[in-house]
Image: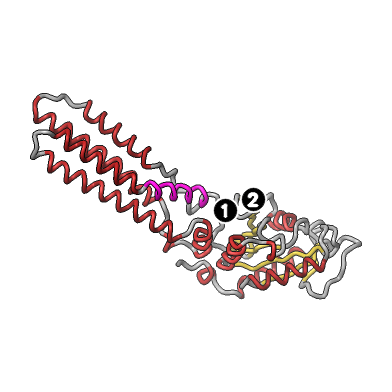
């Protein structure tokens, strides 16, 4: 997954403690006899601590992805959750600190060679390094908070996608399980109260992923906060078609009129092709509806293959994945 390489980001105090302890060990490993060896020991402390700090900060920056290379779907979600501009500024501050600490070490090693009190120069260098680290602590905290959020995003592959929508208990999960032939993977998702179900199936040697997004597309848009609406909007960057399932028997506990109203809201928010399927055609309570495209039964499997064929055609008609999952 894109964000899995991001390790826990330590605080300034944690990094300083690590660096100065390593520096003390570097000094203790040297036998000090006269001014020359004392100078070398103090130099070693400066260079060791600077290398620990500079390298750790550089690694923090390196492990975050290049946001300019992210697929639009993940870019939008990252921007909603943590703010891309905030991430860029924090990463730039950490990168600056990495270079600045390297410069401080080089400067003070030069000063140390011109003085009779190398320990004082080393203490001065340590003070400046600590000051630099303190100035970026808020950036390190922000990056670690962002890391914890971004790692919870589901792994949505750059491939053809079917997004399943509809009220709870209309048969969305049953549809996903039916078409994938197995229990779908459940992935955590920052916007939902439950995990997103992601399954896969093949058509003509091409793989398709099917997403059921409980907590996102199972209640009226008017009930959602701004972040949820933005997350829904991010789905438009997938190479996808939406399957909206109606429970035409109303045994799910929601009236057909309410389900139709939610369908209208989904149409307003999505720039994706939408196929409407009326589920539970095997039940006596099933109503024939003039606004649906197809009838299905996830219990018996009736109409499932035909729905998949239509969805595959719709995805192909929307254009290539390159257009939907383009980079920023």
* Location of residue 175 in the rendering, given as x and y in whole percent from the top left corner: 73, 58
Q: Earlier in the sequence, mark 2 or mark 1?
A: 1
Residue 210 to residue 22: above or below: below
Residue 35 occupies quadrant: top left
Which sits in the foreground, 218 or 139? 139
- The relative height of residue 162 versus residue 38 in the rendered view (above or below) is below
Residue at 82% from the left image edge and 75% from the top image edge: 290
**On the image, which quarter does residue 319 sit in?**
bottom right
As rendered, which of 158 and 223 lies closer to the eye? 223
Residue drawn at x 82%, y 66% is: 256
Left or right, 114 with respect to 174, comes to left
Q: Which residue is mark 1?
A: 154
Q: Name which residue lies at 24% across and 31% down.
A: 26
Report helix, strand or loop for mark 1. Answer: loop
The answer to whether residue 312 is left or right of residue 148 is right
Q: Which mark is residue 195?
A: 2
From the viewer's side, name the closer residue of 208 and 211.
Answer: 211
Magenta highlight on residue 257: no
Q: Which residues are magenta?
A: 137-150
């Amino acid at each position: 997954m894109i964000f899995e390489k991001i390790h826990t980001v330590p605080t300034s105090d944690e990094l300083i403690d690590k660096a100065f302890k390593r520096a003390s060990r570097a000094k203790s490993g040297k036998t000090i006899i006269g001014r020359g060896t004392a100078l070398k020991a103090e130099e070693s402390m400066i260079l060791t601590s600077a290398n620990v700090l500079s390298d750790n900060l550089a690694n923090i920056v390196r492990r975050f992805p290049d946001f300019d290379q992210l697929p639009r779907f993940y870019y939008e979600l990252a921007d909603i959750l943590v703010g891309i501009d905030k991430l860029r500024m924090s990463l730039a501050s950490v990168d600056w600190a990495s270079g600045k600490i390297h410069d401080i070490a080089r400067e003070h090693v030069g000063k140390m060679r011109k003085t009779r009190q190398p320990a004082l120069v080393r203490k001065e260098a340590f003070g400046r390094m600590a000051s630099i680290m303190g100035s970026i602590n808020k950036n390190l905290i922000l990056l670690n908070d962002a890391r914890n959020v971004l790692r919870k995003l589901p792994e949505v592959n750059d491939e053809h996608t079917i997004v399943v929508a509809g009220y709870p208990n209309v048969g969305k999960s049953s549809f996903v399980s039916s078409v994938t032939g197995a229990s779908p993977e459940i992935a955590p998702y920052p916007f939902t109260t439950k995990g997103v179900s992601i399954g896969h199936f093949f058509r003509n040697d091409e793989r398709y992923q099917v997403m059921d997004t409980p907590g996102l597309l199972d209640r009226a848009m008017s009930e959602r906060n701004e972040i949820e609406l933005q997350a829904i909007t991010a789905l438009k960057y997938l190479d996808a078609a939406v399957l909206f399932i109606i429970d035409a028997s109303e045994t799910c506990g929601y009236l057909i009129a309410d389900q139709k109203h939610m369908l209208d809201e989904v149409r307003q928010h999505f720039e994706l092709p939408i196929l409407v399927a009326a589920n539970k055609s095997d039940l006596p309570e099933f109503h024939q509806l003039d606004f649906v495209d197809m009838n299905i039964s996830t219990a018996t499997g009736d109409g499932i293959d035909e729905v998949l064929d239509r969805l595959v055609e719709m995805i192909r008609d929307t254009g290539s994945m390159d257009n939907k999952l383009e980079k920023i």
